[in-house]
Image: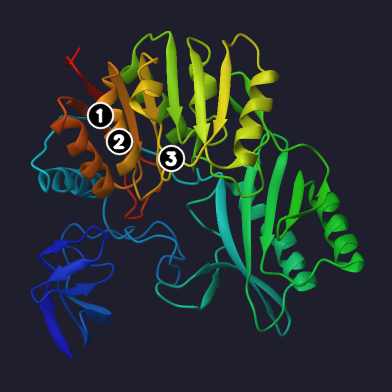
Amino acid sequence: MASVTIERLGHHGDGIAPGPVFAARTLPGEIVEGVIAGDRLIAPKILMPSPLRVTPPCPHFKGCGGCALQHAPDEFVAEWKTDVVRTALSAHGLEAPIRRLHTSPPKARRRAIFSGRRTKNGALVGFHAPQSDILHAVPNCQLVRPALLAAVPFLERVVTYGGSRKSELRLTVTETETGMDILVEGGKPLDIELRQNVTKLAEMAHFARVTWDGEPVVTIARPVLTFGTAPVTPPPGGFLQATDEGEAALLVSISDAIGNPKRVLDLFSGCGTFSLPIARIAEVHAVESDEAMIAALDDGWRHASGVRKVTTERRDLFRRPLMPDEIARFDAVVIDPPRAGAEAQTRELAKARVKSIAFVSCNPVTFARDAAILTDSGYQLDWIDIVDQFRWSSHVELAARFSLDGK
């Protein structure tokens, strides 16, 4: 056994002691004890707690790996996430005003990925323990919307029908305006009996749609989410913002960043989360590599009211980024790349000299790299908003404005 003193939190939320030694769910100033294996302190025991330490609001926190920071007060987590962004920027010699930080409330996640496994007496659906394959039920989860938890008993029966004792099912559950959208992955082959059983369960639970390893099982009601005035049916498992509140906060930031343009380019547009609301004030060209998401966006626009023209393009922006002459036709650009960032596209964007850029990112490290490309080419990083949709996690999302003149 060894005891160490935690000096700070790393960008994954673990406490860091000299060495470095990483200890999960600890806070700066705490003295903790445990067995050191490599660079980790296993099962750390708190010998001297921080005065900041609080009682986790969720009864599942100790055994569940869904949250990492419930032992810290909200104010500490907010400041720590702000520091994560500042540290990432400083690595590239950058700094910017942090205008605001928006944190989604508890029980706000409209989408969750549960794991499911058959047991001797039925099935278990929940989240994994930290860094473990042990599965925990989470009937009082403080993270997801109550409707997602209400669906769990039906998901357990789905696992009973379609799972096995040797494998685990992945259950992506999204609450839409017309009911739950369920994507099951890793289950048994979908035969007639399994299809009938799952269909009956969907009807009992009033699920909107169930998809099994990419194959449609049943659609009782078209799952719908409204973006702006557009009713959009996302593809099964398609990317969405985690909370309504977080999505709204990002839209406010984007609106502030682009002002009142006539034509907007939306890169990595997904199903139209940003494109379709923007279309109420400007023409939009949306670019996305996923064919199903582009189709959902286009269909949503065709059924929207009070919107301007939206055109779509399927394109892999990593392999074939838009060139400066293609970008220069627009007054503003919105870009929301995945965690890897958009280095190749950002290099071309920097050459296009568009007046304003709204940059959304879920990874401060790759954002800072791409931000440096823009600032090195003459853009000004005007401000950053932090949008914390993944409450009690180490995940940090942000929106930023880049401009050529700072206006």
Where is 213 relative to 242, above or below?
below
Tell me if 2 is positioned left or right of 266 in this view.
left
Tell me if 392 is positioned left or right of 183 in this view.
left
Q: At x 82% / y 66%, what residue is drawn?
A: 190
Which amino acid does the dot numbered 3 rest on?
Arg
The tag on residue 320 is: 3
Q: Is residue 102 visible?
A: no
Where is 301 relative to 179, above or below?
above
Depth check, front residue: 230 or 345: 345
Tell me if 226 is positioned left or right of 249 in this view.
right
Residues under numbered marks 2 and 1 in contact, where contact means CB atoms less than 8 Å apart: yes
The tag on residue 350 is: 1
Q: Residues within 10 Å of mark 1 (few under 14, many from 20)?
A: many
Depth check, front residue: 31 or 18: 18
- Find residue 161 and report its image quarter: bottom right
Looking at the rendering, in which quadrant would you find the C terminus?
A: top left
The CA span between labels 3 and 2 is: 12 Å
Q: Residues within 10 Å of mark 3 (few under 14, many from 20)?
A: few
